[in-house]
Image (cartoon, rainbow, N blue to C red):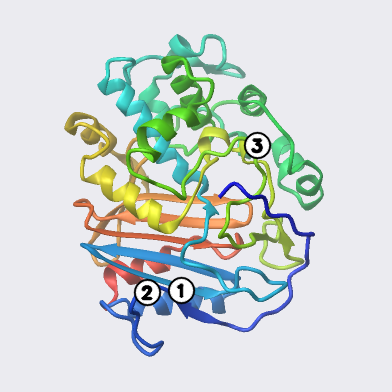
């Protein structure tokens, strides 16, 4: 799991659609067992729309169905694996929020504590004031703290093609990332309380470290979540730039459009995302995590209720404490999180009873999130 993978940067070549199903005793390609035909069709549609490869795993009751389509390596044509490790990006936020809520349950902090109490002087500048922001506001994105990813300096350095290739292995401290946010004004108090900001979870991760005395918030995620749930494919890498095996290559246009060259961006320093999106996992592990969380295995009832107390965050969506409630077109509600990072788009959701879960990853970042796959699984026939 700790072996490193290194390949040269490659430009993408056109590949034909391939689809492979991988799970015990799966039916022939004509029909997916257990009523997953619509899900498989949505996965194949994503490939037709330009996603290099997709891996998806569904857990329903005691049964599991998994599928892949497309390729994991544009150069060799190697298919994706249902066991692929991938960067889960903002799905990490649910893990971070869970640890904060565990600490609240243990009496080590309160969600009504100010950021200033735990991180004195860190949130200051251009109108930011940590004395007026609570931990709850960090976790539900109502803090108004500016998102460091929106800073033009950060974007130029890390999100353009030239900048990314030059700085992809940079090591930046949380304080250096926070400086990008503090160089801007807070989001305006315009009557809309929700403003998604990755900076909130850099701060939340630092609070975990302060409240526990840990050198790294990831140690608490390991001890409190990964180990108890036996999430063998899940980790909080520090500065490791490669993915564990098995894993596919990750691709990006490094632009705001879906045109232009495709870059292999598999290797990068995940520390540039810190608590907002640093983690690596697999679809099976994400299903296990969200199912356990919603079933109350990780939080006492009071803290799980707080996590599921939501604010409006968009059309048919509400956001709790690191956990989103999404109402699908058929009226079904699923709880989970999306995650996007250079070269990877993922979603992991489960029903409120934790009995029906789905996790999916695209190894390309220019064709949107896997919303259609979620709709197909929970609303399709």
Q: Is residue 245 visible?
A: yes
Q: Secondary structure at mark 3?
A: loop
Residue named by callout 3: 239
Which residue corresponds to the image point at 36% horizontal and 32% vertical from the top-left?
Answer: 224
Circles 2 and 1, Cβ within 8 Å, touching? The answer is yes
Q: First in sequence: mark 1 or mark 3?
A: 1
- Please state the horizontal and vertical placement of residue 57, each as a whole percent of the image: 38, 65
- Please state the horizontal and vertical placement of residue 94, each as a whole percent of the image: 39, 40
Q: Is residue 348 above or below residue 34?
A: above
Neighbour tally class for label 2: few under 14, some 14-19, many 20 plus, Cα within 10 Å: many
Q: Is residue 188 visible?
A: no
Find the distance from the CA under tag 1 to the CA under tag 3: 32 Å
Which residue corresponds to the image point at 41% horizontal and 68% vertical from the top-left?
Answer: 372
Which residue corresponds to the image point at 49% horizontal and 15% vertical from the top-left?
Answer: 130
Find the distance from the CA under tag 2 to the CA under tag 1: 6 Å
Q: Is residue 164 left or right of residue 284?
A: right
Q: Is residue 62 above or below residue 136?
A: below
Which residue corresponds to the image point at 42% horizontal and 16% vertical from the top-left?
Answer: 211
Q: Quadrant of the C terminus?
A: bottom left
Q: Quadrant of residue 220?
A: top left
Neighbour tally class for label 3: few under 14, some 14-19, many 20 plus, Cα within 10 Å: some
Q: First in sequence: mark 3 or mark 2?
A: 2
Q: Quadrant of residue 250?
A: bottom right
Viewer-proximal residue among 305 and 172? 172
Q: Is residue 102 above or below residue 305?
A: above
Find the distance from the CA under tag 3 to the CA under tag 2: 35 Å
- Please state the horizontal and vertical placement of residue 314, each as a whole percent of the image: 39, 49
Return the residue found at the far bottom.
30
Q: Which mark is residue 43?
A: 1
Residue named by callout 2: 39
Q: Secondary structure at mark 1?
A: helix
Q: Is residue 340 left or right of residue 104?
A: right
């Amino acid at each position: 799991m700790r072996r490193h993978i290194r390949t040269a940067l490659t430009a993408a070549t056109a590949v034909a659609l391939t689809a492979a199903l991988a799970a015990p005793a799966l039916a022939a390609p004509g029909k997916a067992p257990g009523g997953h035909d619509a899900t498989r069709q949505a996965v194949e549609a994503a490939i037709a729309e330009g996603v290099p490869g997709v891996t998806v795993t569904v857990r329903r009751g005691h049964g599991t169905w998994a599928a892949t389509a497309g390729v994991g390596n544009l150069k060799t044509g190697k298919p994706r694996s249902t066991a692929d490790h991938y960067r889960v990006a903002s799905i990490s936020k649910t893990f971070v929020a869970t640890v904060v809520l565990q600490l609240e349950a243990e009496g080590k902090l309160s969600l009504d504590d100010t950021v200033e109490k735990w991180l004195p002087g860190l949130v200051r500048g251009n109108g930011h004031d940590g004395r007026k922001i609570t931990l709850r506001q960090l976790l539900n994105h109502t803090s108004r703290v500016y998102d460091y990813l929106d800073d033009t300096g950060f974007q130029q350095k890390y999100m353009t093609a030239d900048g990314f290739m030059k700085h992809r292995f940079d090591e930046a401290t949380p304080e250096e990332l926070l400086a990008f946010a503090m160089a801007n004004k807070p989001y305006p108090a315009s009557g809309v309380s929700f403003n998604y900001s990755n900076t909130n979870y850099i701060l939340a991760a630092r609070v975990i470290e302060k409240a526990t005395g840990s050198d790294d918030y990831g140690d608490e995620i390991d001890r409190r979540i990964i180990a108890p749930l036996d999430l063998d494919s899940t980790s909080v890498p520090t500065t490791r730039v490669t993915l564990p095996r098995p894993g596919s290559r990750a691709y990006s246009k490094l632009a705001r459009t879906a045109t232009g060259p495709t870059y292999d961006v598999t290797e990068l320093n995940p520390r540039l995302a810190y608590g907002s999106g640093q983690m690596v996992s697999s679809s099976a592990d994400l299903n296990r995590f969200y199912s356990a969380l919603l079933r109350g295995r990780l939080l006492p009832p009071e803290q799980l209720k707080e996590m599921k107390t939501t604010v409006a965050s968009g059309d048919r969506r509400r956001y709790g404490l690191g956990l989103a409630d999404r109402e699908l077109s058929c009226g079904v509600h699923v709880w989970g999180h999306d995650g996007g990072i250079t070269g990877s788009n993922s979603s992991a959701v489960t029903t409120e009873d934790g009995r029906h879960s789905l996790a999916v990853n695209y190894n390309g970042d220019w064709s949107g999130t896997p919303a259609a796959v979620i709709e197909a699984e929970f609303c399709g026939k």
